[in-house]
Image (spheres, grey):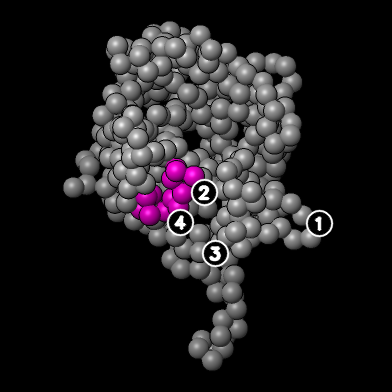
Amino acid sequence: MPQSAETGVKKRIGFLSFGHWHPSPQSGTNTGGDALVQSIELAVAAEELGIDGAFFRVHHFARQLASPFPLLAAIGARTSRIEIGTGVIDMRYENPLYMAEEAAAADLISAHSGGEGRLQLGVSRGSPEPALNGAHAFGYVPSEGEDDAHLARAKTELFRAAISGAGVAPANPQMTGSSALLPIQPQSPGLADRIWWGSGTRATAKWTAEQGMNIMSSTLLTEDTGVPFDELQAEQIQVFRDAWADAGWERTPRVSVSRSVVPITTDEDRALFGGRMAGDTHDQVGFLDGGLARFGKSYIGEPEAIAAELAEDAAVAASDTLIVTVPNQLGVEYNTRMLATIAEHIAPAIGWAPTTPASVVE
């Protein structure tokens, strides 16, 4: 079975949907309902192709997917093998204890075919958003002297403690005869090892390893040293692995990277994406949140050419999981065909082989 050269574990491929919708004739997702139902249908189709993971971006105050757990639970009920995750949940907006209950419930639903659940939850401090201090509207404001990063990390710590079975609320002695701390219920075994931090720098990669979380690195890094994106991201991954070893964790961590991959095989593909081939196939450097950021290039072109390029991508080689973004507004049929092309003609070049498709739950 093909394995990651860095980890010795199976190389996996998943898709990432941002869940856009817009009420226009050009969009295949006119409503939030369209985006949700089609997300379920695409995950079912991806499982049938042997794809390993279905991941969803979480945004607020935008025409995109927001509350992930009803969607993840629905996909878990309709499928039996594919990993189901987020990339990422903005922890500033979350009630960590309620999130722990929702995550455990969705994970247990996904375990209906036996074994542990299939949730792989990416979380982080979040990214720039339409709302000004949107988490404040949800009732979450950083304490005096702290910022959004502190808020997100503190919530993540409490969430992880809760899904690990720690007591988080004192019992009522009149009801229980005890004042011991009570854990949230239900608990889902193994979920605590399937939490990922969305890291944008080498410094946060080190912190992620020290916390014992898996790492999820996207198509941008919020720092720039002048080297190509894939090399900087590979350096970030090595920082993570070194810090993981130094921390003495016993399990092997998971590492994912995201890429924009658009194979051109039909006239429709050329009409939709051919014009981007000249401008999007190189790294870009710009400003994000007041600092320099390096954006990874898009892989657009003939499948054989993309396969050769990805095979030379240092960060893809260093990871165990490649997550490819999909243009969800083009609909389930288009994205299923695109994933099938990636699976058949591109993914084998990075050491991936399809998992035997499981039966889809009717």
Circle nearer the viewer, 1 or 4: 1
- In three-dimensional space, the C-alpha distance between marks 4 and 2, rounded to whole angstroms, equals 22 Å
List the residue tagged with mark 3: 97
Q: Position of residue 234 (x, y in %)?
A: 62, 23
Q: Position of residue 114 (x, y in %)?
A: 31, 51
List the residue tagged with mark 2: 61
Depth order, front residue of 277/315: 277
Q: Are marks 4 and 2 in contact (CB under 8 Å)?
A: no
Q: Amino acid at mark 2?
A: Phe
- In three-dimensional space, the C-alpha distance between marks 2 and 3, rounded to whole angstroms, equals 23 Å
Q: Is residue 207 visible?
A: yes
Helix, strand, or loop for circle 1? Answer: loop
> Dot 4, crowdedness within 10 Å: few (<14), some or many (≥20)?
many
Q: Quadrant of residue 328?
A: top left
Helix, strand, or loop for circle 3? Answer: helix
Which span of residues is magenta-colored? 60-73
Identity of the residue drawn at 34% across and 56% down = 109
The image's mark for residue 103 is: 4
Q: Quadrant of residue 128?
A: top right
List the residue tagged with mark 1: 145
Helix, strand, or loop for circle 2? Answer: loop
- In three-dimensional space, the C-alpha distance between marks 2 and 1, rounded to whole angstroms, equals 27 Å
Please tell me which of labels 2 and 3 falls first in the chain. 2
Q: Are marks 4 and 3 in contact (CB under 8 Å)?
A: no
- In three-dimensional space, the C-alpha distance between marks 3 and 1, rounded to whole angstroms, equals 24 Å
Identity of the residue drawn at 47% across and 14% down = 276
Q: Position of residue 31 (x, y in %)?
A: 34, 44
Q: Amino acid at mark 4?
A: Ala
Circle nearer the viewer, 2 or 3: 2
Depth order, front residue of 320/100: 100
Determine the residue located farthest toward the left in the rendered image. Answer: 362
Please tell me which of labels 4 and 2 falls first in the chain. 2
